[in-house]
Amino acid sequence: MGKIIGIDLGTTNSVVSVMEGGEAVVGVTDYAQSELGDVIFVELPAPGTRVAQMKAFGTIDAVKTVSDLFAPLSGEVLDVNATLKDNPALVNQSPYEKGWMVRLRLNDPKEAESLMTAEEYEKHLGAHA
């Protein structure tokens, strides 16, 4: 996924890597995947779908639970990680690299300013441990 520049604590602990050109890669944090347990299915939107910040865009099914995936930023889905269809365990094994979920063209890259940095997120987790 590259350098993590933002984390949304809204509902699913989404992790976002904003790239040049107003695009972003979205997945879930290592903490979120560990809380979910073994991921067995991921439902993602088709490319071309528009997603809105803090609105559900898919689901993640784990042995323990089924959870909605919420968009940390608004935009258009450019690509999905099709590998997750056959190997959803990549979310557990490599949430920041091989387990990414969608790539977005952002409506407003400034939305990312509302997200926590990776350092702020680590500090937040430490305060709740």
Image (cartoon, rainbow, N blue to C red):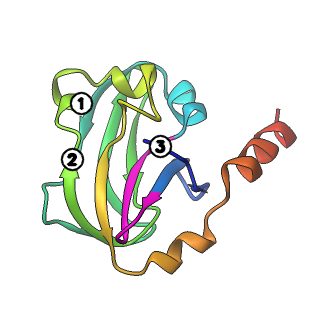
Q: Using the image, tell me which numbered label, if any, was put on residue 108.
A: none
* Residue at 38% over, 48% down: 68
Image coordinates of residue 44 in percent, x first then y, are 22, 47
Kind of residue at disc 2: Val
Q: How many marks?
A: 3
Q: Earlier in the sequence, mark 3 or mark 1?
A: 3
The magenta span reads: 18-28
> What is the secondary structure assignment of the residue under circle 2?
strand
Query: Mark 1 packing: few (<14 Cα in 10 Å), some, or many (20+)?
Result: many
In the rendered view, does 121 fall on the left or right side of 15? right
* Residue at 41% over, 33% down: 97
Front residue of 1/69: it is 1
Q: According to the image, label 3 marks what residue? A: 2
Whole-angstrom CA distance, mark 1 to mark 2, is: 9 Å
Kind of residue at disc 3: Gly
Q: Using the image, tell me which numbered label, if any, was put on residue 80.
A: 2
Query: Mark 3 packing: few (<14 Cα in 10 Å), some, or many (20+)?
Result: few
Kind of residue at disc 1: Leu
Name the image quarter holding residue 125: top right
Tell which tag, 3 or 1, sits nearer the viewer.
3
Name the image quarter holding residue 129: top right
Whole-angstrom CA distance, mark 3 to mark 2, is: 16 Å
Q: Give the residue at the far right of this rendering.
A: 127
The reply to whether the magenta stretch includes residue 21 is: yes
